[in-house]
Amino acid sequence: MTQTIPGLHHVTAISGPPQGNVDFYVGTMLQRLVKKTVNFDDPGTYHLYYGNKQAEPGSILTFFPFVDAGPGRAGPGMASAVAYAVPIGGLNSWMMAFAEAAIDFDGPTERFGEQMIALTDPDGLRIELIETDRGTGDLAAGDDTPVDGGFHSVTLWLDAPDRTARLLTDVFGYSSAGEETDGGVKRHRFQAKGHGRGSAIDLITSNAASIGRQGAGTIHHVAFRAENDDVQKTWQEILRSQGFDVTPQIDRQYFNAIYFREPGGVLFEIATDPPGFTTDEPMETLGQALKLPAQYETQRDRIERILPSISNPKRTTT
Ligand code: ZN
């Protein structure tokens, strides 16, 4: 195996109306709104990107806030949780901040020897904070500036995880990093080489009967990193040779994307690091102006009239 996946690039989810989404991720989770653009397939809907200060791959959580999205529910064949990394000792300040802001959370509990808490965003998406000693930067509440850290892991809920596990180990280059069972949920962790941001994937199977339904509060797809177009092209060839139905490369303005469905049903993407989020605005002012790709720039007036306005979020956890 000559090339391996280093970890997550971004995770994309569906939300309800945008204001509650911005209030939660900027005002409560202290993420930076790094890009305010539109859904390229539906320019009457925003596409909001949150990330760390430098808008780095491995920290980017994006949302399509469909105003009329009905509530979704995680189930087998879907990614069911996103976890942010917190430095060791960092959970206390988050718990105090959540308690002060009257935000419910579960925990602390332990998973694979690490302390964690979990909460849900306004649409019901499960967000976890996990203490780790990996080099993931700071994700500390109480700071007035957006956080520095990134993802710890993402959880995929599967009926039969074996083929997904083999994709991670035999193709992506992850290794098995332990199994745990807790309350009828069997969890198997896979770890990418290098232990960087977002380098763990957990596969869970559950006794709980549930049928997933895509909608507000659910994850739409999980994107992994490729350092450039050449690396992505090689992944496309490798995956096609393994029988996966991989899309052609699609220009997503801030990265190039290819998509395929993994054997358990979750939509996977491989996204390039370049050109990044500073391709159409400077680092200092990322996320402040509505950015449109060239094909929609001529319709800007109409698009701005259709999009709901978003006001500055209230900070609840400082
Ligand atoms: Zn994506």
Image: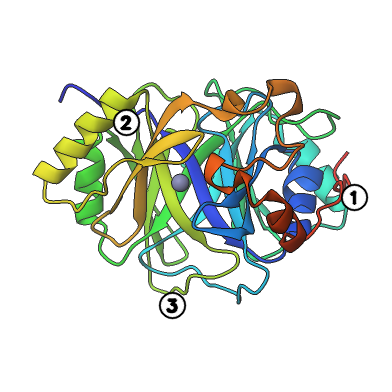
Left or right: 29 in relation to 6: right
Q: Quadrant of residue 95?
A: top right
Amino acid type at mark 1: Glu
C-alpha distance separating marks 3 and 1? 33 Å
Residue neighbourhood size for the residue with mark 2, other residues' Cα within 10 Å, grouped as few (<14), some (14–19), many (≥20): many
- Residue 25: horizontal and vertical position, in percent? 72, 47
Residue occupied by mark 1:
100
Amino acid type at mark 3: Ser
Residue 221 visible here: yes
Residue neighbourhood size for the residue with mark 3, other residues' Cα within 10 Å, grouped as few (<14), some (14–19), many (≥20): few
Vertical side of 216 occupied by 166: above or below: above
Residue occupied by mark 2:
5
Residue occupied by mark 3:
210
Q: Between disc 3 and disc 1, whose residue precedes?
A: 1
- Residue 93: horizontal and vertical position, in percent? 80, 37
- Residue 155: horizontal and vertical position, in percent? 44, 52
Q: Nearer the viewer, residue 95 or 168?
A: 168
